Image (spheres, coloured by chain):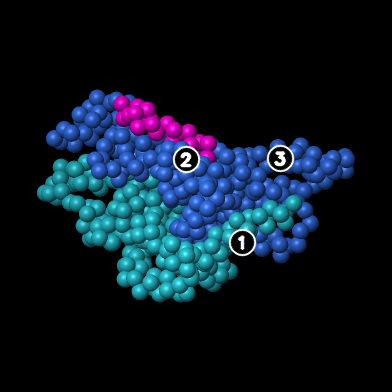
Amino acid sequence: MRRRRHPWRILAIPIFAVIGILYAFPLYWLLATSLKSKAELYQATLTLYPQAPTLQPYVSVLVERGFWVLLRNSVVVCTLSVVIALILGLLITYPITRLEISPRVRVGILNWALSLRFLPPIAVVVPYFAVVRTLGLYDQPQALILIYSLLNLPFTIWMLKGFLSEIPRELEEAAFTDGAGRWTAFRLVLLPLAWPGLFAAAVIVFTFTWSEFLFALILTSTPNAQTFPVGVQGLVTQFEVIWNDMAAAGTIALALPLVLMVLARRYVIAGLTFGVVREK
Amino acid sequence: MLAPVLGAILVVVTYPFLLALLQSLQDAAGHEFVGLRNYVNALVNPLLYEALAATGIYASLVLPTEILLGLGFALLVHRTVRNSAWRALLFVMATIPLVLPPIAVGVIARLIYAPGYGVLNHLLIVTGVIRDEINWLGQPATAMPAVASVDIWQWTPFVYLVLFSGLLTVPREEIEAAQVDGASGWDQFWHIELNYLRPLLLLIVFFRLADVLRVFDHVFVLTGGGPGNTTQLLSLYLYRIEFKYFDSGQAAALAVMVLVGVSIAYSLVTRLLPVERR
């Protein structure tokens, strides 16, 4: 039987079109601006598309302004933060999903991790700034790596707990009866099964860390440790604003999460809601 | 294995809080104890109340708009898009804004609202809506809506995704039974679907309220808190006290008060959060 057409349908198409434009145009405008030459920016009338597309702004940002160093910092900091957050996350979620641990401890840990989600970073930045300075880690990538691993830990715990508790315990128990130890069972049975979840968590933590700005702004001051978002901000608040360079930097900052997101798209919303919303 | 890891993390998380507490009781140089003077200074500073007001205005612009638009769009898609491939496509598209760095989104907003190059003025003049450029980010009346619009752009898709997934959990039989009884689309929403969405709406409100206190990046690049202090949200205010006025005592006092306030609020609402804590 053919379903009766819903009366809202007539409404739907124009609404979808408007929303599509509202989302596509800003992204288009960023890209278009990043492809304009400097001469074009100073024309009397605004051009809605680049008249002579050029990659010069990208060269200017990455090479002439030396932002490739910040890009490298970002990649290093994000990668190491992801690795540490996942290791710590596993060290906490393996016991609470696999070992005989009192439910109170388990619930306590999860509640504690959830509560950190509500902590405003700005209130934490002030004391961390003091700690980082006394430790001599100001303007060092290590400070960012440590803090990012911690900041992402609550989220990592909740994601890994979700993935690990979905893998039946019986599989490992079968390995135990075959004489495998805990470590062997973890490595040969659990890890391969948990791999997609670990990968998704890694991608999402990487994306969050990539976007982080506040801590990077406060705890770094030179290209020794500055991350890419700090560089982008520097271009925006400069005295003379160079739109195409700014747009190119913005495009670069935006590109990586966009690509990574495609890999982990099914887990983003589950992650952001602490598993309340499951992917379909 | 679990105990040492948790212990270490607890120390790393708690130590800065104790330090902040200590800092809040000392003078800015950290030489002598001043009792509660920093707290008094923080509380009598009129800028604090401007910041709280700005945060309140921001929240009241952003939250209802995001929830209503997100809910409307979730219902619209649920009722008109039947094809699962289209639904999957919308799902992916809606995820995109959520992962974009707020700094980059701030840059985009600047390319749209800024005087001179901002494309919004250009489009409005070309279409004849306005005659002269509007300084969106430079006037109190438009700066806050401009800043809020960025939040709405980035986070309405989150509301949509959560509520749409909630609509998928509504049992078909209940809807069909209601339709047989002649229920209107509105009845269907108000008496059936809303019951399934209620816990999710609660989750959205809590998460988004917590996020309002986090907002920093896009406001920092768009207006920096200006014009005047109209868009100086609490987070930007705290930043200014610590890193522009270098009053670390007052900043620590503010940080402690925010932490305590959030903790109290959290402990009051945590039971209502529809999160599976097993």
Q: Secondary structure at mark 2?
A: loop
Figure quadrant of residue A234: top left
Q: Is residue B63 above or below residue B116?
A: below
Label 3: chain letter = A
- Chain under callout 2: A
Q: Of the two numbered discs 1 and 3 on the same chain, state the one appearing first in sequence.
A: 1
Residue lying at the far front in this picture: please name it.
Answer: B31
Magenta-span inclusion, residue A66: yes
> Quick one: A265 or A105, which is closer to the camera?
A105
In primary-sequence order, the first of circles 2 and 1 is 1
Identify the residue at image location x=28%, y=26%: A53
Chain identifier for the blue-coloured part of the image: A
Residue position for label 3: A191
Q: Are marks 1 and 3 on the same chain?
A: yes
Cα distance between the residues tagged 3 and 2: 33 Å
Q: Horizontal and vertical percent for residue B153?
A: 36, 50
Q: Residue at left 22%, top 27%?
A: A51
User: Is residue B252 left or right of A34 when viewed as pictured?
Assistant: right
The residue type indicated by label 2 comes to: Ala
State whether residue B242 appears in this view.
yes
Q: Which residues are magenta?
A: A56-77
What hue does chain B carry in this figure? Answer: cyan
What amino acid is at disc 1?
Trp
Mark drawn on residue A225: 2
Residue under disc 3 on the same chain as residue under disc 2? yes
Which residue was labeled with disc 1? Answer: A112
Foreground: disc 3 or disc 2? 2
Q: Is residue B204 visible?
A: no
